[in-house]
Image (cartoon, grey):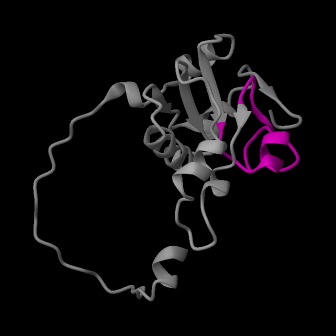
Amino acid sequence: LTAWTSAGNKLSLEPVTRPIKVLTPKPRHKLIAAHDEVLSGINDDAVILVDTLPEAFYRGEMSIYPRAGHIAGAVNIDGLSLLDKKGHLLPQDELATKHELDRNARIITYCGGGIVASTEAFVLTRLGFNNVAVYMASLEEWTANPNNPMETGEAR
């Protein structure tokens, strides 16, 4: 939104009519991680869980979910740190320095509800990682179950 408005584009509440088109979905199920895959990934060295919320949420100092903190074993890459002040993604070389992860790992991104995690997954894919998925239900689902392991503390 910031990038749109800073480029001089207008916002409107008026409805827009577009021609009707046909969408043919082609789901790629390996791009979506479900709860059980995330749970089993906690103790799997071949899986990296990436929390994309701001560090204060990761550390457990702030939360809007039933429990504070992050999924056990997750690393933190704040999704907002991927954007410049106008809302554009940072240059590729700057993004690469934030993603020094194992390229052979299954990487699962999450946030609160899958939105910022999707941006992170997009960035990882652009950087050449080819086994990336988004946990779409993210902390909204995870924190609702007290049996799901959570941690608090400094970012890894």
Camera-side residue of 128 and 47: 128
Residue for point 45% across, 89% down: 8
Viewed as shown, does residue 33 lie left or right of 44?
left
Residue closer to the observer: 24 or 80? 80
* Residue 38, horizontal then vertical, whole percent: 58, 22
Give the percent coordinates (x, y) of residue 31: 40, 31
Q: In the shown orientation, is residue 142 left or right of residue 132?
A: right
Give the position of the C terminus as an image quadrant.
top right
Q: Is residue 2 visible?
A: yes
Q: Residue furthest front?
A: 93
The residue closer to the viewer here, 24 or 124, is 124
Overall secondary structure of the magenta stretch?
loop
**Count of numbered circles on the image:** 0
Q: Residue at (52%, 83%) from the top-left corner? A: 6
Quadrant in the rendering for residue 12: bottom left
Magenta residues, as a range? 51-74
The percent coordinates of residue 68 (x first, y second) are: 81, 40
Where is residue 37 drawn, in percent x and y? Answer: 53, 18
Q: Examine the rendered structure and indicate whether residue 80 appears above or below residue 130.
A: below
| Residue 144 lies within the magenta run | no
Q: Is residue 69 magenta?
A: yes
Report if residue 1 is visible in the image: no
Q: Quadrant of residue 140?
A: top right
**Vertical comparison of 49 with 138: above or below:** above
Q: Is residue 138 left or right of residue 21?
A: right
Instruction: Name the residue rendered at 10%, 53% in the picture.
Output: 22
